[in-house]
Amino acid sequence: QVQLVQSGAEVKKPGASVKVSCKASGYSLTSYGISWVRQAPGQGLEWMGWISAYNDNTNYAQKLQGRVTMTTDTSTSTAYMELRSLRSDDTAVYYCARERGRSCSGGGCYSGYFDYWGQGTLVTVSS
Amino acid sequence: SYELTQPPSVSVSPGQTARITCSADALPKQYAYWYQQKPGQAPVLVIYKDSERPSGIPERFSGSSSGTTVTLTISGVQAEDEAEYYCQSADSSGSYVVFGGGTKLTVL
């Protein structure tokens, strides 16, 4: 069965970096993209970006451009999300999710949707 | 920035029908998706491509689309359906994913 297992909770100081991992099993990582979604305490879902493990193409949310990097390691079926220059408002639960359905054709491009999610990783940014 | 607009809350009695709307300009050009999230849990996909239901999701969940508004309908609401519901789509370029602000469904 498809599973996404994320790394454990992190506590970081402002200005530091965090790297969260997401290990995929039950399917080939290169067959689907991985998106990262975060949720601040008591708030809604925020899409952070997407990576294709097939060709390493990425697409990041504009507000995070320059601070976030997404990578994959196909040898271990693991995706990573690194966020730099952490601030207190980066405190959130970070989820990885398998994205399917992202495509482009003559009619335009379409984002995908998230059919499997990791369990979430709480990142706390505090001095 | 592009936004999807959902009502903050919807309340229904058990057995009634709940309708949750999501509105945005690009919805006629982009698919909409719906997720259910219960406290302390990851979201679960309940509707994809406007109206398709994933396997394992009860038939009482359905989706529809009309112009710039998509609607999640839960027929015969049960107590276990109490949760936050999020719509998801993309901007008109299809490159950037966007979530609605979420709707808290309360079963009275």
Image (spheres, rainbow, N blue to C red):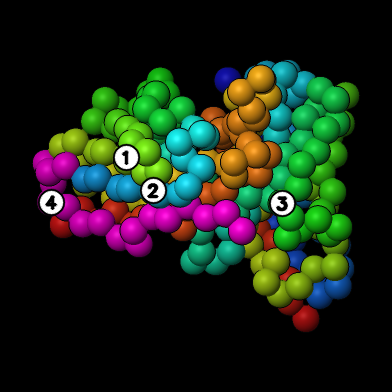
Locate residue A15, reporting x and y percent.
86, 72
Give the mark toward the camera: 2 or 4.
Answer: 2
Residue at 75% of width from left, 24% of height from top?
A29
What chain is tagged by disc 2?
B
Give the mark toward the camera: 3 or 4.
Answer: 3
Disc 1 residue type? Leu
The tag earlier along the polypeptide, 1 or 2, is 2
Separation of residues labelled 2 and 3 (CA atoms): 21 Å
Locate residue A109, reporting x and y percent.
65, 30
In this rendering, do the residues under marks 3 and 4 share a single chain? no
Q: Which mark is residue A61?
A: 3
SS class of the residue under badge 4? loop
| Label 3, residues with CA under 10 Å away: few <14, some 14-19, many ≥20 | some
- Left or right position of A60 against B93: right
What chain is tagged by disc 1?
B
Residue that badge 4 annotates? B13
Residue at 76% of width from left, 73% of height from top?
A87
The tag earlier along the polypeptide, 4 or 1, is 4
Disc 2 residue type? Cys
Give the mark toward the camera: 1 or 2.
Answer: 2
Asked if the residue under mark 2 is in contact with the one under mark 1, i.e. CB atoms within 8 Å, the reply is yes
The N terminus of chain A - image quarter: top right
| Label 1, residues with CA under 10 Å away: few <14, some 14-19, many ≥20 | many
Which residues, given as a range, are shown in magenta?
B1-17
Looking at the picture, does residue A63 appear above or below residue A71?
A: below
